[in-house]
Structures are given as C-alpha cells and as structure tokens.
Amino acid sequence: METVSVNRAFGGVQSVHRHASTATGTEMTFSVFVPEHADGAKLPVVWYLSGLTCTHANVTEKGEYRRACAELGLIFVAPDTSPRGPDLNGNAVADDPDGAYDFGLGAGFYVDATQPPFAAHYRMWSYVTEELPALIAAHFPVDMGRQSIMGHSMGGHGALTIGLSFPGRFRAVSAFAPIVAPSQVPWGQKALGGYLGEDRAAWRRHDAIALIEDGARLPGLLVDQGDADPFLSGQLRPDLLEAACRAAGQPLTLRMQPGYDHSYYFISSFMADHLRWHAGRLKGDGA
C-alpha cells in the first residue's frame, strides 16, 4: 500500500492511499480519516460510497465530515467508485463506448460484473465488501465489530444494498439522495443490464426495493433527499422506498429537505446529522 498524502485535520489525520487490487486487477485509491485517539484504541468505522463520476476525492474535499468524526471518534473511509486504467498488466479498463458519464469509469454501481468486457475489472462489490475492509483492518485502528455504511446517489444505492445484504455487519445504514430502485429507473437499468446481463432475476440482489420485498431487514434506515433535486422523480424515487418499507414493516426515516439539490452543498449540510445518527448506533445507545 502506497501513501499518497497525509494531512493533519481537527486533531486527527486525513490520508490518501493507493494499492494494487486483487478484486479489480487495477490500482485503487481510497481516503481515510482517523481522529485523535489513545495508542492501541480501536475506533468504529463509517464507510462512505460516492456517486456517479466521483472518485474518493469528492467527499474527501467537499463532504465536511472531519469535525464531526473528530468529535464523535469515528474513522471515515471513502473508496473510489470504479476501477480505472490501465490495469496491472498495462491494458486499458473497459469504459462506456460512447463516453457516457453513467456507465463505465466512475460508474461501477457497486456490483461484480458478469458481462464482457466489464467482468474482468468491474468487481466493486467484492472490492468494497471484502478486499478493502481486510486492508483497512490490517493497517488502521478500526474496531471491525462496529461498522456502518452510508453513501450518495449511486453510492446511496450501494450503501442500501450492501447494508441490507450484510445486516449483521453494519450497525447503521444511511443515504443521501439514493437510487433506491435501480431496476425501475434509467440509470440503474443501463448499469445492471450492462454489467449483469438482461436476466432481471440477477438484478434483485442489487436493488434495495427488491431486497426488502425478498425479506432483507435492518433495524432502521435514514435517508435525506432534497426536494429540488433534478433527478428526484426520474432516477431516485424515494417514494418507492417509502412504500416498500411501509409494506414490509421496515423502519425508515425519510427526510425531504426543502430547496436542496443533488450536490455536495446538500450532502455537507446534513453530513453531521448522519454521523451523529451512526455514532449512536455504533456506540450502542441507538441515539
């Protein structure tokens, strides 16, 4: 693992790292904030999954999470959103042939692709749920018994589906403007079809609505959504999540935020709220 940068912030350390990934067959970059702590102390960890076009850098530079993480004693980890080329053998990583922003590079959708040419490198599910956690556990003072996960847009989709798939691992799950039903909206249909093929049965494990319909449950979900988000009705559809949770008896706190859009101005406005919500569950009091 190569350390790209280290900066002091709010008494803790913000660092960026690069490593050769077995899952993706490429170099992958991620950021970690570790608050000030006693030597040998293990801290809870919050995983943050970013949205379309983003790298680790978007939330690291604009998410405004460090002050809250320092106060609450939370490690914050932000991976990239897709493999990027060249791969470890010097070959280009497949991308959308038309150069679209919503598929290919920067748009891994947190799945393990099964369709060529994407299956060779687009293995973000394995990277985020297996490889990166093992790396973080080996190199940082994390208490892997106290994990939570959150994300934005495509990353909100990832946080919801991963959280619902590993309910014993994550004590808290939240999202900003998530894609809740990728099987039913254009972004998701393009991605799941391109990465997983046209058999929609294979899509269900990567669709939060389908997972809830199929019996997946969590103690609670927190979702913030701006009502001025231009993608609200066409791509995000929080109404579908609300209906699915109500039908299943799945606890959900859905907060529609007046005047907020899809940007990091929105995310940073409510980041501390989410981190406090996570901290209460990670520390066992559910506050």
Image: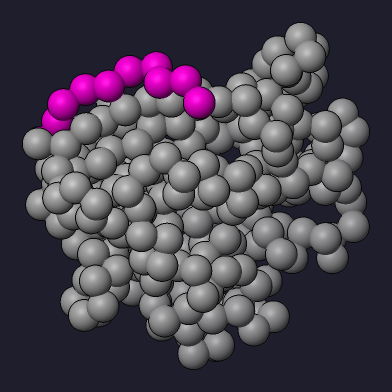
Name the residue at 70% across, 34% down.
22
Name the residue at 67% across, 48% down.
126
Where residue 278 appears, as percent x and y from the top left, is: 28, 64
Residue 113 visible in image: yes
Horizontal side of residue 131 vs 56, given as left or right: right
Where residue 186 appears, as percent x and y from the top left, is: 68, 45
Quadrant for the C terminus in the image? bottom left
Where residue 184 appears, as percent x and y from the top left, is: 68, 58
Task: Please say whether residue 144 is one of the residues in the magenta stretch.
Answer: no
Can you say whether 219 is above or below 112 in the image?
below
Name the residue at 45% across, 31% down.
30
Q: Nearer the viewer, residue 89 or 194?
A: 89
Residues in magenta, as a range: 1-10
Residue situated furthest top in the rendering: 90
Horizontal side of residue 200 vs 33, given as left or right: right
Horizontal side of residue 196 vs 163, given as left or right: right
Where residue 129 appears, as percent x and y from the top left, is: 59, 53
